Image (tube, rainbow, N blue to C red):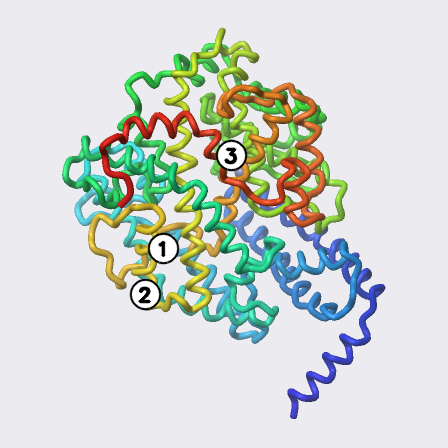
Amino acid sequence: MRWTALLAVVAASAAAQTVADAKKFLDDAETRLLALTTEASHADWIRENFITYDSETLSAAVDERQIAEGVRLAKAAVRFDHVKLPPDMARKMMLLKLGLTLAAPSDAAESAEVTQLAAKLDGLYGKGKYCPDDKKPCMDIEAITRVMATSTDPKELLDAWTGWHTISLGMRRDFSRFVTLSNKGARELGFKDTGAMWRAKYDMPPDDFAKELDRLWEQVRPLYNSLHAYVRWKLREKYGDTVPANGPIPAHLLGNIWAQDWTNIYKLVAPADADPGYDLTEILKSRNTDHLGMVHYGENFFKSLGFATLPSTFWERSLFVKPHDRDVVCHASAWDIDSVEDLRLKMCIDITGEDFYTIHHELGHNFYQRAYDKQPFLFRDSANDGFHEAIGDTIALSITPAYLVKLGFISKEPDASKDIGLLLNRALEKIAFLPFGLLIDEWRWKVFSGEIPAEKYNEAWWQLRLKYQGVAPPSSRGDEFFDPGAKYHVPANVPYTRYFLADILQFQFHRALSQIAGCKEPLNRCSIYQNQEAGRRLNAMLEMGVSKPWQDALYTLTGQRQMDATAIRDYFAPLQKWLDQQNRGKPVGW
Ligand SMILES: [Zn+2]
């Protein structure tokens, strides 16, 4: 009886909605969200630059209000579902509904429970430490990361790996309840489950998007298999029978706790004549480059493409140097405080080659933010969530030896035979990552849909890691363990597919921009530095923000409407050839 009455009321109010009502609703929503986002950014900035109890309390309070308003607007937008809206307004309604990562159910008790579970899981990870039995100090993720990156003692690596995977032992039951409740909230918004809600953000039917990822993976898989085979036999030379001749690689030997980035084992697999003949860190130091100088190199890259200089407030308000007298979050990040002109970089810069790359990457975010600042608030974001990360990395791909020659860092380019070292190093980062970037959400989507039940969480996790990465756990991992929980993004409920997309897109962007710039060399030698036409085409894509489907944005720059991993194969073609020679007569695959 009550249900019928309630439904009648909802139907009546839906029928009464007009386009004018929708416009007023959207205008109000944009005004409120802009104000809340700006306030939250100021508070978050203070919290990350002055980590204290009070700054955390204040920023948590405004973050909570911002999230609550997002949920309220997403649910309120549903009442315009049956109003025929002009495309711009329909897109804004869609973005409002898709802005959530977690949709809390409308039942107040369940809503409180799911938010508490999310905070608890996040906290369990954040406090996660491995405390060895003996008198050794407990190890947090930084300490674990250091061991995984630097040790070549298999016993020590095994101990660190096994130890870190104890932090998630207590998460499984909470995670399973979290899945149930977040699915309930997603269904109230009209999605099949939370995974379907995440996949719906990509301007195509959710199931088509999953197929699209598989297609991209198939394009790049042969290169991954070659890299895997080469690394496996080099590790077998080092560690003996611990590494099988033709099976999966043990997950603790790849220089990273999740085996997602293999750059730390470069020295174990480097070709004998790999040295490109220069060391960027040494060059920067010998030139007495300071922190400001490092950032100016990044800004000058964008200026050389025709972008305007950064505002004076960028230089006044950014953090470049690690303070001596207080705790700050040093993890590099690019900020857009007022969503218009108050751009900032927060980074504890070291004068190293690595940070030279990172600055180019971070400024990619800032110049993207400024390019779309004329859009209405809801459209001030990247075309899809993979684009934002991809832009910075695209620019970093242009840090070639030729670019360093133009900066006067080196007198001439090393010859092409030295490219293999640079390419192998880059492949250990970018190619090794791809299967990992894919499988995290493949696992999670199946968990949310119920295809993977709670008692099979761990078994399914390792099946996917075997299938995609060709890695195996160093010891038997039954379902008493919850190994996905040892990766931040799972307990923190952060979608992961964006990183896979960014890894694919950056090479597609780089190839398109190199062609526009008229580069005739192999793709890995192309830099778009000083090419204003490339800058103009890049900007044309960036300034669209998320106002149009990402396919339109992609087309604007590349002339393609589909993501295309063949650009990766082009970029790494010299390495593929070299790997094929090295792998001759050796097993490939697992
Ligand atoms: Zn980034």
Q: Earlier in the sequence, mark 1 or mark 3?
A: 1
Left or right of residue 10: residue 293: left
- Give the x, y percent position of residue 151: 25, 33
- Which corner quadrant holds the C terminus? top left
Left or right of residue 579: residue 117: right
Residue 322 showing in the rendered view: no
**In this view, the mark in front (2 or 3):** 3
Most extreme residue toward the left, as rendered? 241
- Give the x, y percent position of residue 1: 65, 93
Residue 567 circle label: 3
**In this view, the mark in front (1 or 3):** 3
Q: Secondary structure at mark 1?
A: helix
Which residue type carries mark 2? Lys
Q: Secondary structure at mark 3?
A: helix
Compared with residue 520, is residue 160 higher up or lower down, i.e. above or below?
Answer: below
**Viewer-nearest residue: 97 or 419:** 419
Most extreme residue toward the right, as rendered? 20
- Give the x, y percent position of residue 466: 30, 50
**Viewer-nearest residue: 21 or 446:** 446
Compared with residue 192, is residue 227 higher up or lower down, i.e. above or below?
Answer: above
- Give the x, y percent position of residue 574: 41, 25
Q: Earlier in the sequence, mark 2 or mark 1?
A: 2
Residue 484 circle label: 1
